Amino acid sequence: MERQKLLCRGRQIKKDKDLERVKPGAKMMLMGTAEELKAPTKKYIFEEDLTATQKAELIKEDVAGLNNLGNTCYMNSTVQCLRSISELKGAINKYKNTPSRGTDPQSTMLVQMGQMFNDLDKARAPITPVTFVNTFRRLFPRFAQRGENGHFLQQDADECLMTFMDVARSKLDAKYSVEKDAKTNVVQQLFGFETVRKLKCTEGEEEEKVKTDLARKLTCHIDEKTNFLVQGIEKSLNEVVELKSESLGRNAQYQQTVRLKTLPKYMVVQFVRFYWKKELGKKCKMLRVKTHPKNPFIYPQSTITRPASYIIPTSINRPPYSELFVASQLRK
């Protein structure tokens, strides 16, 4: 273009404004010498020429889902929650690629779960996890229950998640961790935390009992007064329970207070929304609009001296019987 000039009626067209003054139908002349045409140095690939895997690699968002195979929404949401945890995926893939791994049904299920995670990462359209669902139902028949019409029944998402965790805990020991010098199994590393539980009898003069427990989730109790996530968690950490009293020789009421001694890398919170109504003689679901703040502060419910510890929700699902989400925790 440097050796070419565009002329109209003896005037050179240099800018867009010069071109705007040219009347429709006017004759224009291009003067100069032609430049040498060079082949493009960069190869361009069009979208229609890409494979489905190549397209998925270019898209950063998780767009693929799982098709329902007979009331498997509880399972699908749980799988998507676990899939979002890169450390867990890495450990399962490491186990899957180990020649000395087991071949028992639980090992097979864990390998199939890892393959399903990998398929979801590459897919752009929903996939149908027939093999994994059939293996899971054979291994745990309670999730294969059918109703009177022969259709599969709805199941509890929290029970499904705890079952997945039990399988992973039994197979993914410390050597499969993506972290160096790991000493505990992968599930304990990612989800495990310690709590301090205090029990004070409200009907006698018993000495207060203090116990340290291991846990893998918090519980959010939802009733008609619960509007925020933290409120529901506080209810589960401060409640009255009925236990056998050695001094009284009978069951008695105890004030139970639980505080967090340590925090996990990923905090699992179960939403408990079903309560037994005596007047109706059945379980009823509590329908409440709840607020999920971006940074719910849990420091008052812990014994940790760090100034700031948060639960950040990363995935919220609405399974049929209970709600759960996997939340990642920031430490400052």
Image (cartoon, rainbow, N blue to C red):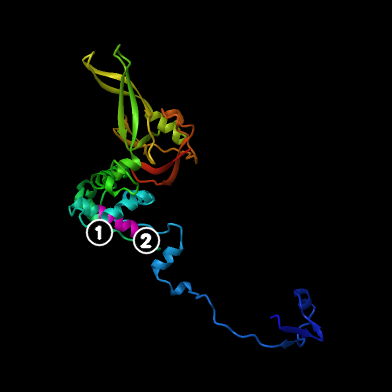
Q: Which residues are magenta?
A: 110-121
Answer yes or no: is residue 151 visible.
no
256 above or below 55?
above
Q: Which residue is mark 1?
A: 131
Quarter holding the N terminus is bottom right
Disc 2 from disc 1: Cα separation: 15 Å
85 above or below 227?
below
* Image quadrant in which you'd find residue 210: top left
Is residue 155 toward the left or the right of residue 269 in the image? Answer: left
Local packing at callout 2 (Cα closer than 10 Å; few below 14, some 14-19, many 20+) is some
Q: Position of residue 324 (x, y in %)?
A: 37, 42
Q: Which residue is mark 2?
A: 126
Q: Position of residue 283 (x, y in %)?
A: 31, 36
**Type of amino acid under label 1:** Thr
Local packing at callout 1 (Cα closer than 10 Å; few below 14, some 14-19, many 20+) is few
Name the secondary structure under disc 1: helix
Q: Residue at x 21, y 15 (%)?
A: 249
**Type of amino acid under label 2:** Pro
* Image quadrant in which you'd find residue 35: bottom right
Relative depth, front residue between 330 and 83: 330
Name the secondary structure under disc 2: loop
